[in-house]
């Protein structure tokens, strides 16, 4: 068992302190080697800043779709009560742009909805796999499997942002249709927790469970408390299938780079694919690597449910970039494959979730207020 050495060493330490504090006996800490997880490739914030384009390109004069209705919505701390919320997908292909579903930043999301949200994820973990997803032992892991299997075609190329937008909406659809989740969706403004992710309310036992620090000798910690405490993951690490715990290992020097400045430096790029590369290797990669362990691995990172809060943040940044110019919801550029020279991507490029939900195209997800989608962010 790969964790046994570290685990024994730590149990010894716990036993000593238990002499004076008997209740600590119950708190077993298991450490894991972080090497098995690898990490996401990065650029530095300095690189992103040096190559940033003038501010005028961010503040384009195109339609500010996400501002519609904001004066009323942003004033309230209450997200809509159960039943009032519209599903994200516009089933009939139409979206009332003045009345879409709203994704609320965690701080603006009702406490009751927060509980319902993590419980719906837990519900997916308790449902059986529908079969056909390699290594999966639950409905939740069906979703993890899709990301693991598609990893080579969805990262470090133009489709990264539209595919992950689609993937989050597939996750949302499965939560709603298979676990009865009927609330508004949240998102996480990571820039507000820059350098102190571990202090975020998300990482408490009531929600996603704690975010332990990377140990001084570079190990991660299995999460044993909270909604997802004691979870066994069957997909990953990497492209393999070895039972392992849900581990985290925060490095706040990495989360500290996930700032408004870094996001804006990336969003200053007028070319879609320049912006995409900067976001992917920038704030997106630092959020993954900063939370660490399961989240730091490219293939099976959705095994940590905080993955979806992170990708809601990445999607928010993408939407804010799109808001600056209407053409950013109708055009795309960059490579569809890794060939040299590559095949240019087009709006007809097919997005697949390996059958979790129907295939779609990039053009159907580029506007969050049309095509397959009907949502905006609360700010
Ligand atoms: C969905 O797209 C994938 C990738 O292009 C393709 O392999 C698969 O056959 C498609 N599935 C359906 C049902 O069209
Ligand atoms: Cu990914």
Image (cartoon, rainbow, N blue to C red):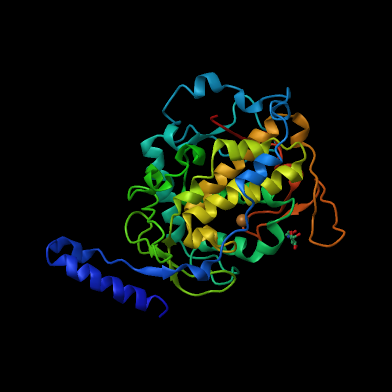
Identify which residue, 171 or 26, lies in the foreground. Answer: 26
Q: Residue furthest top?
A: 71
96 vs 241: above or below:
above
- Quadrant hosting residue 122: bottom left
Question: Could you tell me which residue is drawn at 59 percent across and 49 percent down?
Answer: 284
Percent from the top left, x then y, of residue 283? 58, 46
- The picture quadrant for ligand 2 comes to bottom right
62 vs 356: above or below:
above
Question: Could you tell me which residue is drawn at 61 percent across and 24 percent down?
Answer: 67
Label count reads 0
Percent from the top left, x then y, of residue 338? 79, 61
Is any part of residue 211 visible from this angle?
Answer: yes
Percent from the top left, x then y, of residue 245? 42, 67
Question: Could you tell me which residue is drawn at 36 percent across and 37 percent down?
Answer: 111
Percent from the top left, x then y, of residue 6? 35, 74
- Quadrant hosting residue 327: top right
Identify which residue, 40 or 188, lies in the foreground. Answer: 40
Quarter holding the N terminus is: bottom left
Q: Is 373 displayed left or right of 13 in the figure?
A: right
Q: Is 349 displayed left or right of 224 in the figure?
A: right
Q: Residue furthest right?
A: 341
Identify which residue, 168 or 54, lies in the foreground. Answer: 54
Question: Could you tell me which residue is drawn at 44 percent across and 55 percent down?
Answer: 250
Quarter holding the C terminus is: top right
171 vs 68: above or below:
below
Is any part of residue 188 visible from this angle?
Answer: no
């Amino acid at each position: 068992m790969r964790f046994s050495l570290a685990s024994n060493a730590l149990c010894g330490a716990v036993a000593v302190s238990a002499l004076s504090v008997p209740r600590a006996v119950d708190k077993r800490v298991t450490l894991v080697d972080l090497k098995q997880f690898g990490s996401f490739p990065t650029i530095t914030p300095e690189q992103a800043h040096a190559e940033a384009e003038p501010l005028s390109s961010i503040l384009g004069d195109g339609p500010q779709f996400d501002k519609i209705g904001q004066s009323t919505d942003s004033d309230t701390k209450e997200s809509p009560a159960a039943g009032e919320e519209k599903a994200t997908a516009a089933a009939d292909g139409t979206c009332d742009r003045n009345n879409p579903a709203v994704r609320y930043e965690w701080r603006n999301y009702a406490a009751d909805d927060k509980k319902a949200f993590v419980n719906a994820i837990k519900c997916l973990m308790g449902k059986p796999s529908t079969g056909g997803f390699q290594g999966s032992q639950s409905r939740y892991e069906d979703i993890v499997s899709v990301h693991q299997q598609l990893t080579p075609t969805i990262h470090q190329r133009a489709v990264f942002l539209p595919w992950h937008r689609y993937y989050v909406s597939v996750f949302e659809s499965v939560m709603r249709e298979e676990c009865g989740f009927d609330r508004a969706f949240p998102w996480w403004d990571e820039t507000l927790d820059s350098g102190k992710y571990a202090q975020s309310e998300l990482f408490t036992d009531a929600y996603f469970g704690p975010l332990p620090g990377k140990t001084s000798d570079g190990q991660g910690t299995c999460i044993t408390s909270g909604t997802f405490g004691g979870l066994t993951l069957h997909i990953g690490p990497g492209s393999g299938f070895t039972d392992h715990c849900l581990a985290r290992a925060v490095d706040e020097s990495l989360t500290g780079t996930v700032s408004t400045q870094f996001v804006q430096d990336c969003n200053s790029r007028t070319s879609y694919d320049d912006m995409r590369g900067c976001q992917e290797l920038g704030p997106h990669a630092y959020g993954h690597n900063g939370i660490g362990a399961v989240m730091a691995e490219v293939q099976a990172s959705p095994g940590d449910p905080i993955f979806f809060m992170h990708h809601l943040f990445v999607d928010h940044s993408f939407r804010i970039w799109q808001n600056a110019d209407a053409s950013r919801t109708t055009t795309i550029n960059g490579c569809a494959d890794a060939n040299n020279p590559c095949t240019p991507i087009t709006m007809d490029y097919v997005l697949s979730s390996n059958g979790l939900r129907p295939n779609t195209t990039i053009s159907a997800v580029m506007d969050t207020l049309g095509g397959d989608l009907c949502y905006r962010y609360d700010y």
